[in-house]
Image (cartoon, rainbow, N blue to C red):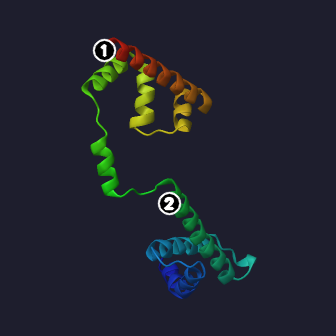
Amino acid sequence: MDQFEIVLAQFEPMITSVMNRCRIYRDQELYRQAARIGLWKAWTKYEDSRGDFAPYAYRCIQGAVLDELKKESRNEERNIPAESETLEVLIKNYRVEDSDIHILDTILESLPTKDLQLLILLYIKGYSYGELAVMEGLTIGGIKKRRDRIMKQIREEKMKSRKKVK
């Protein structure tokens, strides 16, 4: 491992150069670490017969930084932060009536265990459709269809219950 530390010290200027070329101005330590990992992968996979190490290391470092940029970009697209004030207003304005909670409890109690388990895995535990498909031995489309059927059943029961209350 001591040898890699020597290589890392020699290639730190190259890492800085790659970061400057990729215009990394924020979260620099995150990208610097990704570049170091790229250098380490290059160091472990390098073969003398393939040519000089420096160009190969440069490409691996640059690739690692670009991969991290793509990952962060995708993450930013998916997760849009909301200001806490906006969330507070939404929470204050959303009121759940006691009758709605009672209706939902009754509906969930009447669901078959398999259907209730699917809803728990999907909405509470956060499993993806792909993971559930593997667990249940179904296709993703089958899981979605089953979820749609359950949700339709819940909506119908809710409508029936509301008519009874009124």
Residue farthest front in this picture:
166
Q: Say which residue appears at 52% left-offset and 70% top-offset.
A: 34
Answer few, some or many: residues within 10 Å of disc 1's Cα (few below 14, many 20 plus, some between 14 and 19): few
Q: CA distance from mark 2 to mark 1?
A: 45 Å
* Residue 139 visible (yes or no): no
What is the three-letter code of the residue carrying label 1? Answer: Val
Percent position of residue 135, x then y: 52, 31
Disc number placed over residue 132 in the picture, else none: none
Q: Say which residue appears at 55% left-offset and 28% top-offset.
A: 143
Residue situated in front as seen by the camera: 47 or 63: 63
Q: Say which residue appears at 39% left-offset and 19% top-offset.
A: 158
Disc number placed over residue 165 in the picture, else none: 1
Residue at which label 2 appears:
76
Mark sitting earlier along the chain (2/1): 2
Percent position of residue 111, x then y: 40, 17
Q: Is residue 10 above or below residue 28?
A: below
On screen, residue 82 versus residue 65, left or right, reads left
What is the three-letter code of the residue carrying label 2? Answer: Glu
On screen, residue 38 versus residue 85, left or right, reads right
Q: Which quadrant, please, contains the C terminus?
A: top left
Are circles 2 and 1 on residues that touch, CB within 8 Å? no
**Which of the 4 image quarters holds residue 134?**
top right
* Residue 35 visible (yes or no): yes
Percent position of residue 92, x then y: 27, 44
Mark 1 secondary-structure assignment:
helix
Residue situated in front as seen by the camera: 53 or 99: 99
Answer few, some or many: residues within 10 Å of disc 2's Cα (few below 14, many 20 plus, some between 14 and 19): few
Number of residue marks: 2
Mark 2 secondary-structure assignment:
helix
On screen, residue 98 versus residue 24, left or right, reads left
**Which numbered disc, 2 or 1, marks the residue closer to the eye?**
1
Percent position of residue 95, x then y: 28, 36
